[in-house]
Amino acid sequence: MKQQILILGAGFAGMWAALSAARLTDLHGRHDIEITVLAPRPELRIRPRFYEAGVENFAAPLLPLFAATGVKFITGVASEIDSASQQVWYHNEQDQLAAVRYDRLVLATGSQMAPALPGAQQYAFDVDQMESAARLEQHLAALAERPESVARNTVIVCGGGFTGIELATELPARLRAILGDSAAIRVIIVDRSPVAGGRYSEQLRGVIEQASAELGVEWMLNAEIKAIDESGLTLKNGEHIASSTVVLTVGVQASPLTRQIAAERDPQGRLHVDGQLRVIGQNAVYATGDVAFASTDDQGNHALMTCQHAIMLGRFVGYNVAADLLGVEPLPYSQVNYVTCLDLGAWGAVYTEGWDQVVKSTREEAKKIKVAITNELIYPPQAEREAAFAAADPLAPFV
Ligand SMILES: Cc1cc2nc3c(=O)[nH]c(=O)nc-3n(C[C@H](O)[C@H](O)[C@H](O)COP(=O)(O)OP(=O)(O)OC[C@H]3O[C@@H](n4cnc5c(N)ncnc54)[C@H](O)[C@@H]3O)c2cc1C
């Protein structure tokens, strides 16, 4: 019987884990190890683009790529990981419960919003998953049919992190296209920080402030959200902002499947992993992408919940899980370079390098970099064996 590497999730981390594991087994000429990806659908959803209009287009098919590289795919949603018997229970396409066994498991089920705010489930929107981003898009389009009002014209973005900023700076143009140039549009970012972009470098903050001011995006700072209802948002200080569209970008947590692994987790639910990306305390379970709390270097930095990290974590975990079964030396995960490229809507973008976020380019120049990253670099490789294996090499240049 073949040995099984089972990868849960077909996001950036899961897809690259599969290709990288397939590459290493191929390099060693071994055909007794099977690599299987289990996920709800055989496509890579490009989450970093979900704040843009046209969200239903941001997915790339994976079956041709998996066929070219010898990776098996199972359509399903995993519900239970049984570490003792080394099998995973999942619901298949017919919603029947089925089981698949593994010799090594790679958890790559990503992250999702888990809002705890009163009224959030019922009244708030988000751009976290394709379905919820599509719901927001439909809602925005339907605003045009409503009578003019302050609430109709006001969009509140809760959270001034990267996702909140990218969405908010994109919205003035999107809203004008829907509501017309004469509508008194307001886009407000609500954040508990005392300064706009408070968690970023001073240089980056300066750019964010300038772009926000030029686009007319307002920041409501030192603001703690109390509740959301159909009339808008209420702050803990009692202030109420009328809005038909409150969008949450805060409260992202690692996939709930992480709770089924007996191991330490960080406050976002990510599993602590060692240098090989094996879950600490587990022999047969690895974690990667948004579910892994992994050290990136010897300077005390850790991987963030970003696609930039998920791609490299995927390439390394695939190598290491295959090396484990092949009995060859693992490759410790290391990702020293860190860049950010933040879309700032019609203003352009900003590109920084290093953990201290030194601004390297802005406006149109940075926008070209952003487009190259989100429209090309992060998409799957060609469905061609040699090209895919070359790209899956953890030591191949990335950023
Ligand atoms: C709006 C937005 C903007 C972003 N912008 C950026 C950016 O500019 N730059 C950047 O680097 N990052 C960005 N990110 C973050 C980035 O998208 C994530 O860090 C990245 O997608 C993580 O990759 P992943 O493979 O770990 O998880 P995901 O991409 O979330 O993939 C998870 C996979 O697991 C599957 N899955 C989930 N549950 C189960 C289950 N129970 N059983 C089986 N399969 C399951 C999913 O269907 C999916 O295939 C952004 C995210 C969002 C939402």
Image: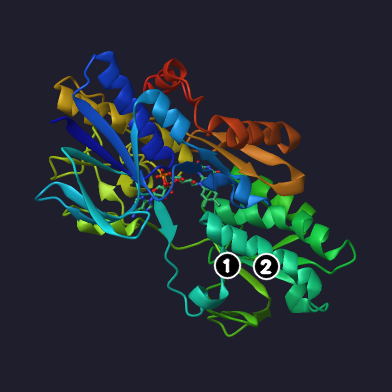
Q: Nearer the viewer, residue 360 or 50?
A: 50
Colouring rule applied to residues: rainbow
Kindly indicate the quadrant of the structure image that contains residue 260. Answer: bottom left
Kindly indicate the quadrant of the structure image that contains residue 58. Answer: top right
Mark linked to residue 176: none
Q: Nearer the viewer, residue 191 or 275?
A: 275
Residue position for label 1 = 125
- In the rendering, at what x and y percent does residue 76 appear? 35, 51
On screen, residue 370 above or below 89? above
User: What is the C-alpha distance between the residues marked 2 and 1?
Assistant: 9 Å
| 145 on left or right of 94 | right
Residue position for label 2 = 139
- In the rendering, at what x and y percent does residue 273 appear? 24, 42
Q: How crowded is mark 1: few (under 14 residues within 10 Å), some or many (20 or more)?
A: many
| 150 on left or right of 389 | right
Question: Looking at the picture, which amino acid does disc 1 mark?
Answer: Phe
Looking at the image, the residue that sits furthest to the left is 84
Question: Looking at the picture, which amino acid does disc 2 mark?
Answer: His
Contact check, label 2 and label 1, Cβ < 8 Å: yes
Residue lying at 75% horizontally and 74% vertically, measured from the top left? 152
- In the rendering, at what x and y percent does residue 129 appear? 51, 56
Residue lying at 56% horizontally and 50% vertically, measured from the top left? 162
Q: How crowded is mark 2: few (under 14 residues within 10 Å), some or many (20 or more)?
A: some
Q: Nearer the viewer, residue 303 or 178?
A: 178
Q: Who comes first in sequence, dot 2 or dot 1?
A: 1
